[in-house]
Image: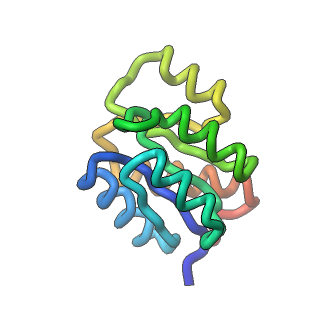
Amino acid sequence: MARYSILIADDDASCRETIGDTISRAGHGVVTAATGTEAIEIVSRGEHVFHATILDMFMPDLTGLQTLEALFRIVNPFPAIFVTADESKELLIKAMEAGAYTLLRKPLSARLVVITVDQLLRKYYGSSGN
């Protein structure tokens, strides 16, 4: 049984699958979306209870920031980690102002993803389920 459920939205299929596999191996449930719009639709259906989300900062339909803003209208708080290839300090500041837990730079280290998710879960839920 999965400890927590994580929504992953990234338009890059290989990145989405890699993050999903990494989170799944850590014992968490994973639902993936290829776009921000799809992520919003998944959450809107209410079929899953999500404990956190990992959002690509730049997707073709909505940015990660726009997606998180819409998700907050459905579930608030919705702990979020942004991922991006852009390493600008300005983008990190925007992510933090939007309420993100952090921003990770691509290419992602599987170990860093697991550590970051565990830290987020401890912060919001008091435990990473270990």
Res 84 visible: yes
In the rendered image, which quarter is residue 85 located in?
Answer: top left
Residue at the outermost bottom position: 1
At 67% from the left edge and 34% from the top edge, which residue is drawn? 99
Residue at left offset 40%, top offset 47%: 35
Q: In this view, does 14 lie above or below 89?
A: below
Q: In this view, does 81 lie above or below 6?
A: above
Q: Position of residue 56 (x, y in %)?
A: 42, 41
Please report the residue visible at 37 percent of the width from the left and 56 percent of the height from the top. 19
Q: Whole-percent x and y of residue 110?
A: 35, 54
- Percent x, y for residue 89? 48, 16
Which quadrant: the N terminus? bottom right
**Residue 130 visible from this viewpoint:** no
Residue nearest the observer in this picture, 41 or 122: 41
Q: Position of residue 107 (x, y in %)?
A: 28, 40
Which of these two is toward me, 50 or 34?
Answer: 34
Front-lying residue, 47 or 94: 47
The quadrant in which the C terminus is found is: bottom right
